[in-house]
Image: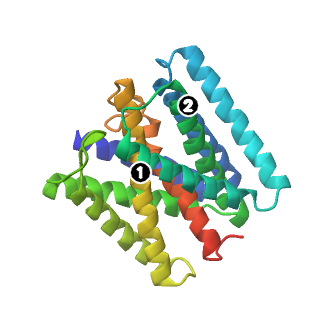
Amino acid sequence: MLKQRVLTAIVLLAVLLTVMLGLPPIYTVWLISALVLVGAWEWAGFIGGGSPAIRATFTGVIALALAASLWLQAVLPGFVYGAVAVALGWWLVAFLWICFAPTRVNAVTAALAGLFALVPCWLALVYATLATNGTHWVLFTLALVWAADTGAFFAGRWFGKVPLAPRVSPKKTWEGVIGGVALSAVVAWLAATYLFTVDVWPFVLTCVAVAAISIVGDLAESMLKRAAGLKDSGALFPGHGGMLDRIDSVTAAAPALVFALFGLGVLS
């Protein structure tokens, strides 16, 4: 299983790097859009059994929401900042939902959760790409999340004893959280020191917070999968599951990081 996961990850990384580093930024926008819409199709599996009609309808709604948010970003100054701020509020609600009522899931709440998770994530990544005419912040967001996921996987596997959220995801542990956040801090320090023109330690501390928030995205998807009786959101990636199983943490991390970049003066 680990070998299959690694091979799939290598192929995915090669595709992403080819698009994001080898092609103009607009191709990254199209790639992000495709990934989010595939995620929307899978998210509909949490809604009323996920029939083809429900999946098509929900994916269409998300597509319209993406188009509307792009238009609003163009005509309303400050819209992106407001949208990612709302997204942070949503992830606080999701955190409380996971802590206190993880079994209170129905079609309406699952659909709203998908809207608040997928649309701000797409908007944050697309804005970071278009505002800088580059893909470096998208790549960094993915690197930060993958560091958190990888650190959590190995720390949990080697040292995990204390369950993090047993009613939602029994295999996740606090030791995994510590390992994931620590590896994310290392990635943030390297990026701040050698790649970006930012104040190193404020940036590192910000990224530690973003890595912690990304865990809520992971747990939220786990909560919805458990409510729907699913092990994975799909079977698109061998050894990894579906698209959502790869981007669930990104849905929380992307708006959180872009919100922070506004605060640090990196984006405007």
Counting other residues with Cα less than 10 Å from the Cα at mark 2, is it few (<14), some (14-19), or many (20 or more)? Answer: some
Taking the image as shown, residue 167 lies to the left or right of residue 98, namely left
Q: Residue at x 57, y 35 (%)?
A: 112
Q: Residue at x 28, y 56 (%)?
A: 152
| Quadrant into which the N terminus falls | top left
Amino acid type at circle 2 is Ala
Amino acid type at circle 1 is Val
In this view, the residue farthest toward the right is 75
Q: Residue at x 52, y 35 (%)?
A: 39
SS for tag 1? helix
Residue 191 visible to the viewer: no
| Quadrant into which the C terminus falls | bottom right
- Report the number of numbered marks: 2
Judge whether 93 appears above or below 196 on screen.
Answer: above
The circle drawn on residue 216 is: 1
Judge whether 93 appears above or below 47 on screen.
Answer: below
Taking the image as shown, residue 30 lies to the left or right of residue 54, namely right
Taking depth in this image into account, of 233 and 16 the one nearest to the observer is 233
Give how far apart the Cα atoms at labels 1 and 2 are: 17 Å
Counting other residues with Cα less than 10 Å from the Cα at mark 1, is it few (<14), some (14-19), or many (20 or more)? Answer: many
Q: Quadrant of residue 179 in the image?
A: bottom left
Give the residue pinned by disc 2. 111
